[in-house]
Amino acid sequence: MFRKTLKKDPELFQNVSEGLRKLYRTKLFPLEDTYRFHDFHSPALEDADFDNKPMVLLVGQYSTGKTTFIRHLMEQDFPGMRIGPEPTTDSFIAVMHGEQDGVIPGNALVVDPKKPFRKLNAFGNAFLNRFMCAQMPNPVLESISIIDTPGILSGEKQRISRGYDFAAVLEWFAERVDRIILLFDAHKLDISDEFSEVIRALKNHEDKMRVVLNKADQISTQQLMRVYGALMWSLGKIINTPEVVRVYIGSFWAQPLLVPDNRKLFEAEEQDLFLDIQSLPRNAALRKLNDLIKRARLAKVQAYIISSLKKEMPSVFGKEAKKKELISNLGEIYQKIEKEHQISPGDFPKLEKMQELLNGQDFTKFSALKPKLLETVEDMLANDIARLMSMVRQEESAMPSQTVKGGAFEGTMSGPFGHGYGEGASEGIDELEWVVVRDKPTYDEIFYTLSPINGKVSGAAAKKEMLKSKLPNTVLGKIWKLADVDKDGFLDDEEFALANHLIKVKLEGHELPASLPEHLVPPSKRGTVMQA
């Protein structure tokens, strides 16, 4: 009945969030519930999981600047904030928007249906006493929420003293956040055993992961190159994937740079990271859709594993012995399911973890395979998700300006301290004199060697000179279009000088503008270009 209604009525879902919520409740949840998905992998999703703002999770060893990074983004202290060289943040702090400053303790937070944290109740009091929500009115928090985490320490003793499974809590957050930022200190780059374990626990979420090499202004350029290389090598060993995680290098706080040699690099990196964070509200619906697809694929595999184990169990005698045998042969069961149902090996849960979890389960209470439940999920993946995907695009185009505003994001938006201001094609933007005039005598000498006719050189003559730059034809073609301001197929002395100026801009490593900025239009052409 539900499936027929879904196909007939295209107005069934008002928006993507509502669509995801309904699909989860009516199609995916029954499969998860039947095959104990919530005992093995992840608690059931709640309404707040579909409606909440994008979240950014900060993870790092102590004194890597996690809390300072949040303060830098918001340009404001938040309730419960503590900063220092020693391990100061000993709690998980969800920094969220609120009308007034205040702190909500963990036990109260997990019973609030409007917050996406209710399922954290499963981690017990030891965790909840170390969990809080800092609420405050801040423009950055109107678009995103930020999760600050305790500094990761080294040594087995520290891990035991936490009283809760730190890696499991981080994995719970990783499933639900939109971006995971791993912070490293360029001044003291060491990755402890616990941090390595945490990174491995986050391995299934590499697409959300970004790395920040912080405090990079404390070392010289040569040292920075070595530290960057060492970090990439260490991460490669831990994550063990051919893809390279994006690393942002900089000094993310509002203090003067100690070693200012790499200022331009730090500015460009900060700008890239800010753009990445600012894109989160626009891509939030797509991220939730992607996470639901990942969850559905895992739930299907879970159903095949549990039903296979149920099928192999004897009805009367030898149940315990058979259970042990099945657990030890789980790898072979994986292979059988993989071949029988054409499932990718990457969709299966980790073998060792699954074996460990199965030890505490009663196999006789497992459910047999119910094809109808699996067909419903297949239908969801094949039809409903495709329809929601088109709705995502519609929502994105209807809200193109949805971005993170306020705090540090405002400082680099415009004005002389905006990224790239007065550099490359923007050079001379606020000068009265045409910037090309500085080098025009040199360009004029070349221009008159090309035997201009009626004060202009042909495209063929200009091409020979422009090719000396060794830039590709695609780039030179764009420069020609920008420089031929009056579009007559020839270049006069000003247009020729402009072409050479743009070649210089490109050779210095800057991007060419999509259209010619006003300050680069040759003086003799300014009236005609404005009218055109």
Image (cartoon, helix red, strand yellow):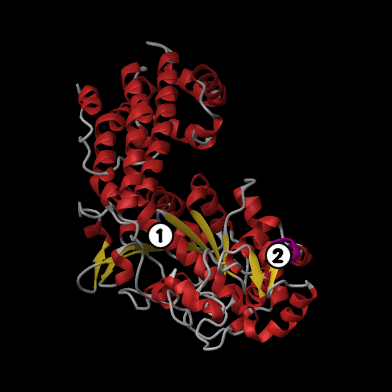
In the rendered image, which quarter is residue 147 located in?
Answer: bottom left
In the rendered image, which quarter is residue 103 located in?
Answer: bottom left
Q: Position of residue 62 (x, y in %)?
A: 50, 69
Over which residues does the magenta segment extend? 458-463
Q: Give the CA distance from mark 1 to mark 2.
A: 56 Å
The verdict on residue 460 being magenta is yes
Label 1 Cα neighbours within 10 Å, binned few <14 / some 14-19 / many ≥20: many
For the C terminus, give its image quadrant.
bottom left
Q: Position of residue 131 (x, y in %)?
A: 33, 61
Disc on res. 275: none
Residue displayed at 62% across by 52% down: 244
Looking at the picture, tell me which residue is in the foreground, 100 or 441. 441
The prevailing secondary structure element of the residues shown in magenta is helix
Disc on res. 56: 1
Mark nearer the viewer, 1 or 2:
2
Residue displayed at 51% across by 17% down: 340
Amino acid identity at mark 2: Ser
Element carrying mark 1:
strand
Sequence order check: which comes first, mark 1 or mark 2?
A: 1
The answer to whether any part of residue 88 appears in the image is: no
The verdict on residue 166 being magenta is no
Q: Is residue 399 above or below residue 148?
A: above
For the N terminus, give its image quadrant.
top left
Disc on res. 458: 2
Amino acid identity at mark 1: Val
Looking at the picture, tell me which residue is in the foreground, 273 or 476. 476
